[in-house]
């Protein structure tokens, strides 16, 4: 049986997909508001990580919400992938498969962040003569997580870029929605490449936060647009 191109009103998967985007955007927003941040403009790793250990529960809870948000967004991407079966289908499939990989990478990356928070907490509570050894553990876990995070940014926003191209080529989604997603994705991919060759810094974190906010708004708008068609 041939799958029809488009969004059919009442289609359960499309309704679920719209809800996935909207829920994901809401969870991204709450997570961003809860996540502790350094109060200074320093690029020192210790000062950047210290607030995470000082507010361990908030950091861990925020990380959990962020993870669930990416899982929810995956459902939204699956809905877009399902709706495109002719024009733009190759890009839609690439977008979906890369989102699967990107979501898996996000799950691993956030898990490493939670592990980093635990090591930071141990470092903060360690006796004076044990501080150096405790910090060496923090630095090792953080460095490993930094490498994974950079690749995660590249893969995940490559997925959104492919999906946006599919939207532009299809006759289903408005051109402005596809172009907006593409415009938001390209700087994030570039940021991921830059981060591979540079240490953690407040500047890169702030740029990421702005682009993540724009991505959140795009997913929210996409979810609402699909919901108006499917519900």
Image (cartoon, rainbow, N blue to C red):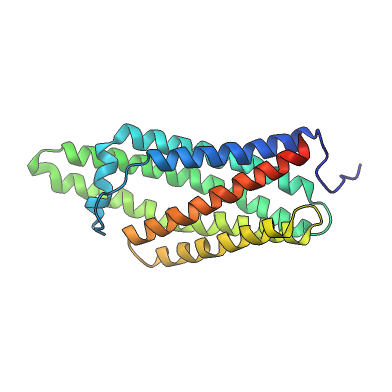
Q: What is the residue that sits farthest to the left in this orientation?
A: 129
Front in this rendered view, residue 132 or 103: 103
Residue 47 can be seen, yes or no: yes
Measuring 65% from the left and 35% from the top, which residue is drawn there?
19
Residue 119 can be seen, yes or no: no
Tell me: 162 left or right of 170: left
Measuring 46% from the left and 64% from the top, which residue is drawn there?
191
Q: Where is residue 60 in the image (x, y as percent from the top left)?
A: 37, 35
Q: Position of residue 227 (x, y in %)?
A: 71, 39
Front in this rendered view, residue 24 or 229: 229
Measuring 90% from the left and 45% from the top, which residue is drawn there?
2
Seen in the picture, residue 222 relative to 178 is either above or below; the reply is: above
Seen in the picture, residue 128 relative to 173 is either above or below; the reply is: above
Measuring 33% from the left and 55% from the top, which residue is drawn there?
143
Front in this rendered view, residue 210 or 128: 210
Q: Position of residue 107 (x, y in %)?
A: 49, 42
Q: Position of residue 45 (x, y in %)?
A: 25, 55
Tell me: 31 left or right of 160: left
Q: Tell how many labels.
A: 0
Question: Quadrant where the N terminus lies?
Answer: top right
């Amino acid at each position: 049986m041939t799958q029809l191109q488009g969004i059919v009103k009442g289609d359960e998967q499309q309704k679920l997909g719209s809800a996935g985007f909207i829920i994901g955007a809401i969870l991204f927003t709450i997570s961003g508001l809860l996540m502790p941040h350094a109060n200074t403009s320093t690029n020192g790793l210790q000062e950047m990580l210290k607030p995470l250990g000082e507010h361990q529960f908030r950091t861990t809870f925020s990380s959990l919400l962020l993870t669930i948000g990416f899982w929810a967004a995956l459902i939204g991407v699956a809905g877009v992938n399902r709706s495109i079966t002719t024009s733009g289908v190759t890009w839609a499939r690439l977008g979906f498969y890369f989102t699967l990989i990107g979501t898996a990478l996000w799950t691993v990356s956030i898990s490493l962040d939670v592990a980093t928070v635990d090591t930071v907490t141990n470092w903060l509570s360690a006796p004076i003569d044990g501080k150096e050894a405790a910090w060496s553990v923090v630095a090792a876990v953080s460095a490993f997580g930094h490498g994974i995070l950079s690749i995660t940014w590249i893969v995940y926003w490559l997925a959104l870029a492919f999906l946006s191209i599919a939207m532009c080529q299809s006759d289903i989604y408005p051109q402005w929605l596809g172009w907006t997603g593409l415009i938001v994705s390209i700087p994030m991919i570039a940021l991921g490449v830059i981060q591979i060759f540079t240490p953690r810094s407040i500047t890169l974190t702030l740029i990421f936060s702005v682009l993540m906010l724009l991505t959140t708004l795009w997913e929210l708008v996409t979810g609402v647009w699909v919901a108006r068609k499917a519900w």
